[in-house]
Amino acid sequence: MTAPSASLAAAAPLGQSWSDRFWTSHDGLKLHFRDYAGSAERPPLLCLPGLTRNARDFAQLAERLAGKWRVICPDLRGRGDSAYAKDSATYNQLQYADDLERLLAQERIDRFVAIGTSLGGLLTMFLAASGPDRIAGALLNDVGPELNPAGLARIRDYVGQGRSFPTWMHAARGVEESQSPAFPRYEASDWLGMAKRVMVLGAGGRIVFDYDMKIADAFAPAAGAPDAAAKVDLWPAFMALSGKPVALLRGELSDVLTAQAHAAMAQRLAGADAVTVAQVGHAPMLDEPEAVAALDRLLARIQ
């Protein structure tokens, strides 16, 4: 069963295409997800964001597919409209996966399509490893079982800095400073759009990143990351996707998923659709023509 129960369903406000809904973690956090209504005859799409990102990253994808597909876009703990954790040690992949298990249980979802960007792709593999039969299909966006330490080190360097900006244009320039190598074709309007996805107006009137800065604690060198993360054997979790419709996306300029690792993934997972998104680094926004086409091919296989 994949539709929300009547007691849990909530109507979207006038002019809004999604409902803001919530679930509760085992340690009592109120966690948020956007719920775009769609056909109950198809498995829902579970869209899982990257480390510092949130449900807004999937807005364009969800708007395009909603109606035909139910699209669920969670904010992981400490991001977006989800509560911040009392203990920063719970900002880890196993805890995120447990939180998602509770969301799936609340919504009585026993089969779904996972769309995972970066960290969200790792969580997709974990969910597949713990219950492969429920995976109707998966898209892994610029992530895989082998992670490049150089890319992880770059991410470690900017996560948790806590910068703030006086205006949205200043915020857009700030995002451009750190992300321009990954998006060389972006113009001012693109950077402004990205800023509004990753930031919010803070209580002090300045524009701030929309995540708990403490998520960096588990990603710090003292915690054994990122080098340890690059050495963990994730191939068994990846291979849990065997026999499923799978799309493997890589940004051509990515420093997190190497071309060699991407090729190895496609070789080991028979039938996977391996796609390189031109002139994009980590990670494609899923609005690029190559990414849109890959997702449509994936969903056609599931229909």
Image (cartoon, rainbow, N blue to C red):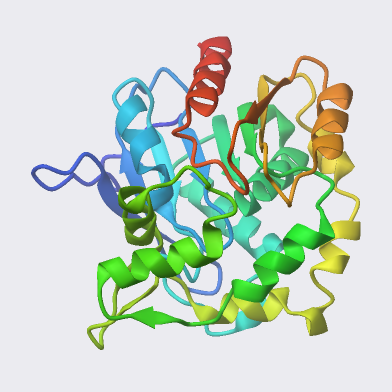
Q: Is residue 107 left or right of residue 214?
A: left
Q: Is residue 95 above or below residue 70?
A: below
Nearer-the-camera pick, 116 or 131: 116
Q: Is residue 280 left or right of residue 150?
A: left
Task: Tell me where residue 74 appears, x and y as whole percent.
Answer: 45, 52
Task: Tell me where residue 260 appears, x and y as whole percent.
Answer: 86, 36
Task: Tell me where residue 196 appears, x and y as whole percent.
Answer: 32, 59
- Say if residue 171 shows up in the picture: yes
Residue 71 falls in image quadrant: top left
Residue 113 falls in image quadrant: top right
Residue found 74% across the figure and 62% down from its top = 152
Residue found 56% across the figure and 79% down from its top = 160
Task: Tell me where residue 303 appears, x and y as whole percent.
Answer: 50, 11
Nearer-the-camera pick, 234 or 202: 202
Q: Is residue 156 left or right of residue 175?
A: right
Nearer-the-camera pick, 24 or 187: 187
Q: Is residue 274 left or right of residue 114?
A: right
Q: Is residue 58 above or below residue 171?
A: above
User: Which residue, as the protein is rendered here, is positioned at the far left?
Assistant: 14
Nearer-the-camera pick, 2 or 20: 20
Residue found 54% across the figure and 65% down from its top = 178
- Say if residue 81 shows up in the picture: no
Q: Is residue 43 above or below residue 174?
A: above
